Amino acid sequence: MKFEDFWYVVALSKQLKSNQVLSRQVLGEWLAIFRTKNGKPVALQDRCTHRNSRLSCGKVQQGYLQCPYHGWVYDESGGVVSIPSEGENFKPRASLKAKQYHTCEQDGFIYVCLTEEIKPQFSPFSMPYYQQPGWHYVRVVHRFNNNVTNCAENFIDIPHTVSVHPGIFRKSYQQKLEMTVTRTQGTVIANYHNEDTNLGWWTRFLNPSHHKIYHSDRFFMPNITSVEYQFAPRRHLFITSQSVPETETSTLVYTDATFSYGIWSYLATPFVSYTAKRIIGQDVKILQIQQEVIEKYGEKFAHTQADTIHVFVESIRKAIAQGKDPRTLPDKTIEVTFWV
């Protein structure tokens, strides 16, 4: 198993117009993304086979991609279908082909899989309640100067919230929390117990009647995190992030805040949008600081009980990096107590 075997978001569906080509990078690979005449998304290696120009700097005409340097034209399979300098004498050659990658479109995202296999063994992650009746969502995109592992750990980490997001999403009350953390089949699940309404400026809106809170954080291999809160029958929230590895130190993160607040959902949308951008912006800064220290002193972490969820995430991503299947790791459950 390799990181290339999984699906990664390369664009929002609405970003890719029929006459447009997008430049993207996943796992260090340059990609040119465009649509065929029928609207199907295509991903080619961003390299013209002729003189190594970037195809993403070209143009799309009737579903074909034309190189900006000498005008060579590529179809959806990466094959060259026209060479202007050869005119009517042009004949297709198997040797003239740009590398093509698997693509699909789902939940308003365009995905690419870099696997060498004829058919990917996995499917893209299904976003919770995407466009389902009664549910609303806010979608934001941020670039982090850090790797996928550190981003994913940040998104499902409670202790940092009182320091990085004080007043917005928790205050330091030294509240005792308990969590059950399980690693199984390439996923990590953390269920929290006895959590109260210490949720910063969200408190009065999210849980005005002080219902019992259900809170669960999840990691799905190799790059998905999903935070779920349920405060009452009509107060339900998911924060789901897909961390896309552009390079070893650059991660593009697509985040959906999906919520169902009953009759208040429409009014809540701008509030959710503002808060999500504020919180993620703070995380961008703290992860930039972390990366600066890692570059100077190396990546060596100390762990406490509260970091159990991170240790499990790291074990899964380390297994994939070593070419192993993390689903073969032994199932493990740990009970943890910590304070925030």
Image: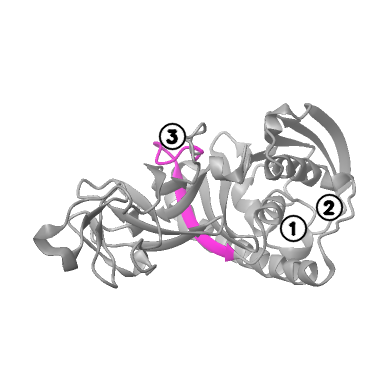
Where does residue 88 sit, x and y in percent of width and height? 9, 59
Residue ID at (62%, 43%): 222
Q: In front: 49, or 63?
A: 49
Q: In front: 161, or 68?
A: 68
Mark 2 or mark 3, earlier in chain: 3
Residue at the spot of label 1: 161
Mark 3 or mark 1, earlier in chain: 3
Q: Which residues are magenta?
A: 125-143
Q: Amino acid at mark 2?
A: Val
Residue ID at (81%, 29%): 332
Q: Residue farthest to the left? A: 88
Q: Are marks 2 and 1 in contact (CB under 8 Å)?
A: yes
Residue ID at (38%, 52%): 43
Above or below, comparing residue 252 to residue 230 in the picture? below
Residue at the spot of label 3: 118
Residue ID at (62%, 41%): 228
Provide the secondary structure element on which disc 3 rests: loop
Provide the secondary structure element on which disc 1 rests: helix
The CA distance from mark 2 to mark 3 is 48 Å
Q: Amino acid at mark 1?
A: Thr
Neighbourhood count class around disc 3 (C-alpha, 10 Å): few under 14, some 14–19, many 20 upward: few
Q: Report the number of discs.
A: 3
Q: Amino acid at mark 3?
A: Ile
Above or below, comparing residue 206 to residue 161 in the picture? above
